[in-house]
Image: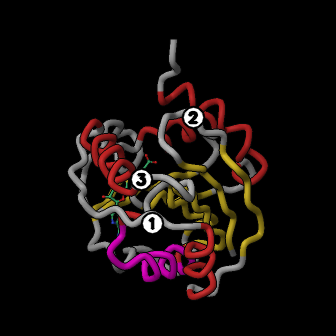
Amino acid sequence: MSKSLEEVIIDLVELFRPHIESLNSVLDIGTGSSIPIHVFAEIFPQIRFMTIDVTDARQRKKLPFVIYDGISIPFDDLEFEGSVLNETLHHCEEPELVLLEARRVAKSVFVIEHFPSPDASFSELYETEIYALLNFGMNFPLYNPYTEDSLLNLFEKSRLKVLDRIEIPYYGKREIKKYFYKLE
Ligand SMILES: C[S@@+](CC[C@H](N)C(=O)[O-])C[C@H]1O[C@@H](n2cnc3c(N)ncnc32)[C@H](O)[C@@H]1O
């Protein structure tokens, strides 16, 4: 039997634990269904979590949430110790601005992104991405997947240094690889 999203996330927590458990506050940018960050909040109850997005597609609503304009994050400089962009950047119209804002409001920025395999079909990736979002009640047509080079280029333009990079096991059927980056 395949695992539920929550079970998959619980398995992945151990990968990120060394980076997360010492933080006292985290902002989840582009929280979407908000399921992953709620699982983290249950496992790390000592951390103060806040969530934001440009639209409200949340399926879990225990954590505080604000809608914003997708450009100016409505929090003070360094109000958080960490900000998280989990599969969010490839849906942003202005990803560089979002990254700059993520760094302005937090000392460390944690990015999770997937990269299509070199021979993957873009139309199939696009369809499976949009289908997955629709399954979570999100109708979001913008999908600009990165290659590792284009993502590193974006980090450089945003003046962010990669402090760690971890490959995330992916057991799905899409032709992708997933990575976690810690940036400062
Ligand atoms: C794939 S979903 C996010 C998944 C979610 N982070 C998770 O952990 O399950 C991508 C999200 O990015 C959001 N988004 C798009 N543009 C954004 C922006 N400029 N700032 C923040 N979120 C944005 C979308 O509304 C959508 O909820």
Residue 18's x, y, as percent?
A: 78, 49
Query: Mark 3: which secondary structure?
Result: loop
User: Which circle marks residue 9 in the picture?
Assistant: 2
| Residue at image coords 64%, 54% | 179
| Residue at image coords 65%, 56% | 180
Crowding at dot 2, Cα within 10 Å, few <14 / some 14-19 / many 20+, comes out as: some
- Which stretch did the figure color magenta? 92-104
| Residue at image coords 71%, 78% | 161
Mark in the foreground, 2 or 1? 1
Mark 2 vs ligand 1: CB under 8 Å? no
Q: Amino acid at mark 3?
A: Ser
Q: Amino acid at mark 2?
A: Ile
Crowding at dot 1, Cα within 10 Å, few <14 / some 14-19 / many 20+, comes out as: many
Mark in the foreground, 2 or 3? 3
| Mark 2 / mark 1, whichever is N-terminal | 2
Crowding at dot 3, Cα within 10 Å, few <14 / some 14-19 / many 20+, comes out as: few
| Mark 1 / mark 3, whichever is N-terminal | 1
User: Which circle marks residue 31 in the picture?
Assistant: none
Residue 135 against residue 111 in the figure, above or below: above
- State the residue lying farthest toward the top: 1
- Evaluate if marks 2 and 1 touch, with contact meaning CB atoms under 8 Å apart: no
- Main SS class of the magenta portion in the image: helix
Residue bearing the label numbered 1: 89
Residue 118's x, y, as percent?
A: 56, 59
Residue 82's x, y, as percent?
A: 61, 63
Q: Which of 16 and 76 lies nearest the eye of the viewer?
A: 16
